């Protein structure tokens, strides 16, 4: 789920709960990216209601049921330390952030989004004197971050991150010119030629309001009406097939932690040293990233494999 515009302020007045589950002004503030089966409006409104309206006597327990507190504090700490000047939840604006709610762990986690204005880069320079509680401009976040039980978690997270001691060098480079001037490969030239030809023929034949596509070598127009979500008026989000061979190959080329990294004590020790952590602490903090990693891609038996066997390490 992603914020839409700058009104996703995780705020709900108690007297406006009735009928809000289907209110169009609420639906327009949040865009579902993972399907209704993962996050429903009722789930979201319940979480926001807890942040805003749970009584003090039960606030800690109620919040922990719907929010991964440690993850949220990590999100706010990273935004503060990287001097994120983008209008985002991390600096007090209901914009440019995502949320995820799992199946085995249904607590909401925050997902960082839009990192084009950090560390002094982008169209707005950073400010070393910026307060670390800018996110508290939003009432619900102010209550959450300054809650006596939760505030120490935020400070501890800031201390842990600043203690990593990892030095980075940031070099400004606008690659737009290089990207625009890169010579197209033969496939690019052939594919765009075919798309352009089909688009012109389609318009001359009276066609309109469609996106041009080629499937299996054949022209297939996709009507705009089929691409738009009637509830939001926005383009439907097409999900990536994470069980496809193409995804498995792309994932294998990513620089990321893998399950086999944690199976080698020497590798874990090396990574832990870079992060200034003990191997045990490194496993505790990062092993969850590979818990649901699919098995390696097996091309020899790919035709007989189930879909869940296709997206692994490679």
Image: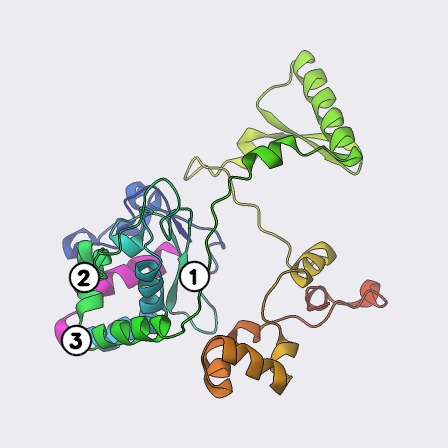
In the image, residue 41 lies in the stretch drawn in magenta:
yes
Label 2 sits on residue:
142
Looking at the image, which residue is at 19% across and 73% down? 59
Point out the tag, 1 or 3, that comes first from the N-terminus: 1
For the image shown, how many numbered marks are present on the structure? Answer: 3
Label 3 sits on residue:
148
Label 1 sits on residue:
100
Q: CA distance from mark 3 to mark 2?
A: 12 Å
Rendered position, 41 above or below 103: above
Residue 302: numbered disc: none
Rendered position, 148 above or below 229: below
In the image, residue 144 lies at what x, y percent?
22, 66
**Which residue is at the front of the view, 67 or 154?**
154
Badge nearest the viewer, 1 or 2: 2
Q: Which residues are magenta?
A: 38-58
**Which residue is at the front of the view, 292 or 236?**
292
């Amino acid at each position: 789920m992603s914020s839409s515009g700058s009104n996703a302020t995780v705020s709900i007045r108690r007297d406006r709960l009735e009928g809000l589950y289907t209110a169009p002004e609420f639906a327009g503030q949040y865009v579902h990216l993972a399907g209704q089966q993962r996050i429903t409006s009722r789930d979201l409104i319940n979480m926001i209601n807890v942040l805003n309206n749970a009584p003090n006597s039960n606030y800690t327990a109620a919040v922990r049921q719907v929010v991964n507190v440690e993850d949220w504090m990590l999100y706010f700490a990273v935004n503060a330390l990287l001097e994120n000047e983008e209008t985002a939840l991390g600096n007090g604006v209901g914009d440019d952030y995502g949320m995820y709610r799992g199946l085995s762990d249904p607590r909401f986690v925050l997902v960082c989004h839009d990192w084009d204005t950090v560390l002094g880069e982008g169209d707005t320079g950073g400010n070393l004197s910026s307060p670390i509680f800018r996110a508290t401009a939003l009432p619900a976040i102010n209550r959450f971050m300054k809650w006596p039980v939760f505030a120490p978690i935020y400070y501890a997270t800031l201390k842990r991150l600043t203690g990593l001691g990892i030095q980075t060098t940031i070099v400004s480079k606008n690659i737009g010119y290089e990207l625009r001037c890169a010579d197209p490969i033969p496939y690019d030239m052939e594919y765009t030629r075919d798309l352009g030809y089909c688009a012109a023929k389609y318009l001359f034949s009276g066609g309109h309001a469609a996106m041009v596509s080629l499937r299996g070598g054949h022209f297939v127009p996709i009507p705009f009406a089929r691409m738009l979500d009637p509830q939001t008026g926005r383009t439907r989000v097409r999900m990536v097939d994470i069980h496809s061979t193409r995804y498995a190959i792309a994932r294998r080329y990513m620089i990321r932690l893998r399950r086999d990294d944690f199976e080698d004590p020497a590798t874990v020790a090396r990574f832990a040293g870079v992060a200034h952590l003990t191997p045990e602490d490194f496993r505790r903090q990062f092993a969850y990233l590979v818990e649901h990693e699919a098995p390696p891609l097996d091309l020899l038996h790919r035709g007989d494999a189930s879909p869940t066997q296709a997206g692994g390490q490679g």
